[in-house]
Structure formats: C-alpha cells, structure tokens
Image (cartoon, grey):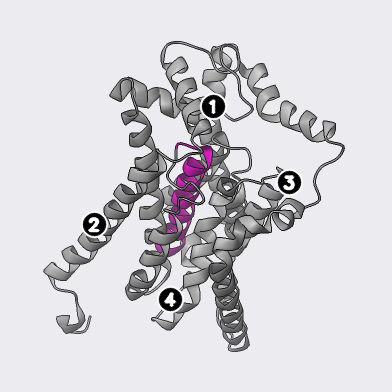
C-alpha cells in the first residue's frame, strides 16, 4: 500500500503548477512574437511567407517557385494563409504555435526525466534560451520548426522510456523524421533518438516484451511515416525529381563548386563571434556535463544503470550531431545555431536537476 497522502499534492497544487508553466510560456511567446517579426533581418521570413502564399494559390513547389530548402515551411505558410487570409497574422500564428510547442515539449522533457522540482530550474532556462532574438527564435524560419519537431521527438522518446507505451516510440520517430522536411540539417534529434533506442538495455521496463531490434523497427517506422505524405504529394504534383535536386543535388553541387566540403566544425570555429552570447551557457553546460559524467561513473562503479542512456546521452548526441550538421552546411548566421539551443539547455540544467532530486531515464 502507498504511504498516507500527506506527501501528495493537493488538487490546487496539481492545477496551479501546470497553470504557472503555461502562463509563463505564453507570456514569453507574446514578448518574443511582438519583436521577432519586425526585426531588420526579416528577408527570409518574408520570402517563405510569399512562397507559402504562392502555394496557397495553386503554385507547385520547385516548379512554379524554387528554393533549396525542403517544402515543409512553404506548406505550413500556405495553410496559414488559407486559415488567416493575407497579412502577417498567418506568419505570427504558425511561428507562435511552433514556439509554444517547442517550449512545452522542452519543459515536458525536463519534467519527465527529473524530479518535478527540477522544472522550476529548467523552465526559466528554456524560456530564456528559446526566445532569443539574437538567434531569431520564433521567427518564420526553417530552424524554428526544426526545433519544434525535434523537441517533440525527444519528449516522446523520454515518455516511452518512462512509461513503455509503444505509441510514444512511433510519435518520436514521426516527429524526428519530420524535422528534415523543414531543413536538411535537422538531424540532431533523429540521430540522438536512434542511438538511445539502439542502446536501450534489455533490462529497461520500456522494452517490455519487445526486443531491441523491434523497438528500433518501430521507431524507424515512425520516421518512415513522416516521409510518406510529403513524398506522395510531391510525386502527385510531378515535382518529386525537381524537389530531390533542389533539396539534395543543388546543395551538393554548391559544395563541390566551392572546392570541397567544409572541414567539420570549421565554420563554427571561424564564426565563434556568433556564439559569444552563449559563452556563459556553454561554460555552464560544460560544467554540468562534467558533473553528469562523474555521476555516471559513480553509478557504474556501484553497479547502477548507466546515466548516459538517459537525458545526458540524448542531449549530448543531439548537440554534437546538430553542431556537425551546421558546420558541414557552412552555417555562418546566428539563426543557423538555433537548433542547438534545446540540447544545450538540457545539458545546462541536467546536473542541477540531479541535485534537485533527479530520477533520470535509467
């Protein structure tokens, strides 16, 4: 039997906690959206909105309008124009919705993988990191929607590892698989989740009667499910070959024309000034990572479950692959680094979450 309910939260507390989180997220989004759509460097956002308007009027992507980005952002803007009509309202709607989803999912990751009290440490960090105008967070850019998809994918993975429900594994695959349809470099969460699913020890309750290979198969089935609709639509419009060249071939040719692929992390190093605003966060993340590794070593020496299979492992791979993808794409604008902000936030609060009573994924 359970202990008496003296330690249970009262009904008021159970309602007040989520209400405070929702109110804080909405307030942060309002502040962000009131500024980000009227910044000086809004050319790409307006271009994506224009292409979305063209698609809403019947234009076929890569045949009537062309860009070297995947079509996800065009379709999303087209839906916004259908829903809101002409004007900036549709752009604000989809951007604000993506930011709310990202912040809600990131908060959910912290709450799922740590003691509930850790959320009050992680939430302020998430609100600050994911609403920065310097990185154009919340703008009508591909990175904004990549971040939303990746955060949902990692949250679903964490929920699967905690609860063992297979539906979460499919959602994780679908969300991670959708991210590259907004930008080709949106591979960090996909790689991280794949590694974590593959590394799940047989003793984990999440596997249940599943073998590790069947779990990987279910995750990849979710990834495949995210590929089917856009491929089907492009094929039906006769634009699949044009899309393949724009998304893959053109970028490959552009790199070849430049002489060679950039050295991994070269652009990150050469554009170090763009990360200047992350100096404090990077330093704290490094300290947090060191503390997490020390905690991992202690757990292993005592025969515990390796923590690297939990949040620390997910965030580390997510950050590393994200940085690698940015560097190989030659990213040199601040907004290119937006997809690394969620894993950087998680690494920064992971150790504090442990101190607050963490109960990690392992």
Q: Is residue 320 magenta?
A: no
Numbered disc 4: secondary structure: helix
Provide the secondary structure element on which disc 1 rests: loop
Q: Look at the image and give the residue range highlighted in magenta.
A: 140-163
Whole-number angstrom distance, CA of label 4 to CA of label 2: 22 Å
Residue 41, image x, y percentages: 51, 38
User: In the displayed structure, does residue 178 sit left or right of residue 107?
Assistant: right
- Report crowding for label 3: few under 14, some 14 to 19, many 20 or more residues within 10 A (C-alpha): some
Residue 165 image point, x, y percent:
41, 55
Q: Tag 2, which secondary structure? A: helix
Q: Of callouts 4 and 3, which one flags the residue occurring earlier in the amino acid sequence?
A: 3
- Which comes sooner in the sequence, label 2 or label 1? 2
Please give the label number shown on residue 23. 2
The residue carrying pointer 2 sits among few (fewer than 14), some (14 to 19) or many (20 or more) residues within 10 Å by Cα, namely few
Question: Could you tell me how far apart the alpha carbons at marks 4 and 3 are, in whole angstroms?
Answer: 33 Å
Question: Which residue carries the number 1 mark?
Answer: 71
Checking the image for residue 328, the label placed there is 3
Of labels 4 and 1, earlier in sequence is 1
Instruction: Measuring from the top left, give residue 349's x and y in whole percent.
Output: 47, 71
Q: Residues within 10 Å of mark 1 (few under 14, many from 20)?
A: many
């Amino acid at each position: 039997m359970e202990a008496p309910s003296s330690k249970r939260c009262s009904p008021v507390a159970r309602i007040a906690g989520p209400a405070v989180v929702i109110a804080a997220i909405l307030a942060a989004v309002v502040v962000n959206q009131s500024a980000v759509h009227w910044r000086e460097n809004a050319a790409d956002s307006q271009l994506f909105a224009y292409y979305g308007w063209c698609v809403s009027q019947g234009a076929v992507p890569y045949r009537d309008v062309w860009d070297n980005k995947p079509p996800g952002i065009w379709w999303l803007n087209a839906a916004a124009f259908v829903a809101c009509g002409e004007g900036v309202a549709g752009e604000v709607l989809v951007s604000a919705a993506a930011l709310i989803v990202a912040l809600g999912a990131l908060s959910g990751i912290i709450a799922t993988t740590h003691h509930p009290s850790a959320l009050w440490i992680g939430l302020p960090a998430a609100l600050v990191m994911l609403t920065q105008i310097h990185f154009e967070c919340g703008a009508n850019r591909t990175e904004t929607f990549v971040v939303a998809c990746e955060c949902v994918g990692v949250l679903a993975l964490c929920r699967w590892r905690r609860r063992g429900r297979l539906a979460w594994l499919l959602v994780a695959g679908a969300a991670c698989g959708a991210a590259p349809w907004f930008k080709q470099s949106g591979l960090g969460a996909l790689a991280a989740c794949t590694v974590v699913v593959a590394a799940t020890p047989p003793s984990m309750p999440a596997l249940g009667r599943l073998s590790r290979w069947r779990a990987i198969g279910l995750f990849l089935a979710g990834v495949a499910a995210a590929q089917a609709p856009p491929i089907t639509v492009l094929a039906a419009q006769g634009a699949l070959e044009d899309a393949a060249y724009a998304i893959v071939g053109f970028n490959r040719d552009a790199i070849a024309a430049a002489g060679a692929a950039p050295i991994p992390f070269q652009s990150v190093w050469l554009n170090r000034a763009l990360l200047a605003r992350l100096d404090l966060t990077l330093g704290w993340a490094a300290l947090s990572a060191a503390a997490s590794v020390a905690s991992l070593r202690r757990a292993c020496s005592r025969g515990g479950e390796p923590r690297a299979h939990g949040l620390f492992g997910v965030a580390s791979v997510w950050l590393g692959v994200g940085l690698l993808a940015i560097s190989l794409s030659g990213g040199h604008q601040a907004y290119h680094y937006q997809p690394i902000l969620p894993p950087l936030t998680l690494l920064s609060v992971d150790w504090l979450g442990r101190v607050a009573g963490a109960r990690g994924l392992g």
